């Protein structure tokens, strides 16, 4: 994956710069291992997310911008830590009161984003800023198996233009898909009314 231009803040967007026009799509890779996904822009792979175990307790996300681990540290109350693979520094922590309910991502500098499902039946989630403005929207599709039931296999990502200056954009895209897969594929998903963060 090649690196593209740098913005004024010095953040390498890699292949993410042109994606407002071309779009992003998560696809399950052809690897037979459990839940390996590729984030694509057309034919180009711009990031990947590989789950290390069927329970989804650990995943590794990679892109031209770096590599991160996503670790589920919660049992009853979801708590997911996003760390740099290079130096193990914590970038953000996602917390939710209950599985399948809205949660909050808090960055190391104190900034927060809310993660919520769009509507009761909509197959979509989004991150919102403190003012309720969308930052990233993830729409997903499930395939059905006669043995295991519905399972997320692909989805699209919409990045709001005002968020291209967000230094944590790539790990945020990885976290959004990680949460989508966990909340839809595992026993953690509960059909409950959604409350605010």
Image (spheres, rainbow, N blue to C red):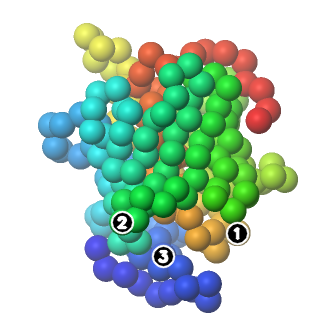
The vertical placement of 18 against 69, above or below, is below
Asked where in the image residue 154 lies, by quadrant, the reply is: top left
Q: Which mark is residue 86?
A: 2
Earlier residue among tags 3 and 1: 3
Towards the viewer: 183 or 120: 183
Whole-percent x, y for residue 133 in the image: 77, 54
Q: Which residue is mark 1?
A: 162
Using a 10 Å C-alpha cutoff, classify the residue at mark 3 as few (fewer than 14 neighbours), some (14 to 19) or many (20 or more). Answer: many
The tally of labels here is 3
Q: Which mark is residue 13?
A: 3
Towards the viewer: 159 or 129: 129
Residue at the (55%, 58%) spot, across then down: 91
Earlier residue among tags 1 and 2: 2
Judged from this view, the residue extending furthest toward the left is: 32
Residue at the (81%, 52%) spot, across then down: 130
Q: Nearer the viewer, mark 3 or mark 1?
A: 3
Measured Cα–Cα span from mark 2 to mark 3: 18 Å
The vertical placement of 135 against 31, above or below, is below
The answer to whether the residues at label 1 and label 2 have Cβ atoms under 8 Å apart is no
Residue at the (30%, 14%) spot, across then down: 148
């Amino acid at each position: 994956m090649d690196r593209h231009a740098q913005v004024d803040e010095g953040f390498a967007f890699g292949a993410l710069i042109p994606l407002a026009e071309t779009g992003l799509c998560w696809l399950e890779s052809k690897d037979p291992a459990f839940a390996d996904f590729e984030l694509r822009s057309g034919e180009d792979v711009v990031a990947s997310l590989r789950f290390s175990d069927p329970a989804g307790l650990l995943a590794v996300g990679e892109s031209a911008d770096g590599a991160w681990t996503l670790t589920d540290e919660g049992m009853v109350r979801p708590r997911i830590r996003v760390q740099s693979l290079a130096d193990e520094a914590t970038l953000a922590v996602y917390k939710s009161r209950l599985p399948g309910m809205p949660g909050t991502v808090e960055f190391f500098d104190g900034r927060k984003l809310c993660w919520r499902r769009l509507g009761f039946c909509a197959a979509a989630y989004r991150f919102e800023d403190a003012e309720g403005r969308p930052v990233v929207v993830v729409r997903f599709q499930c395939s059905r198996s006669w043995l295991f039931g519905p399972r997320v296999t692909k989805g699209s990502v919409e990045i709001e233009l005002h968020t291209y200056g967000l230094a944590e954009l790539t790990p945020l895209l990885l976290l959004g898909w990680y949460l989508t897969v966990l909340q839809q594929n595992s026993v953690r998903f509960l059909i409950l009314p959604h409350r605010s963060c």
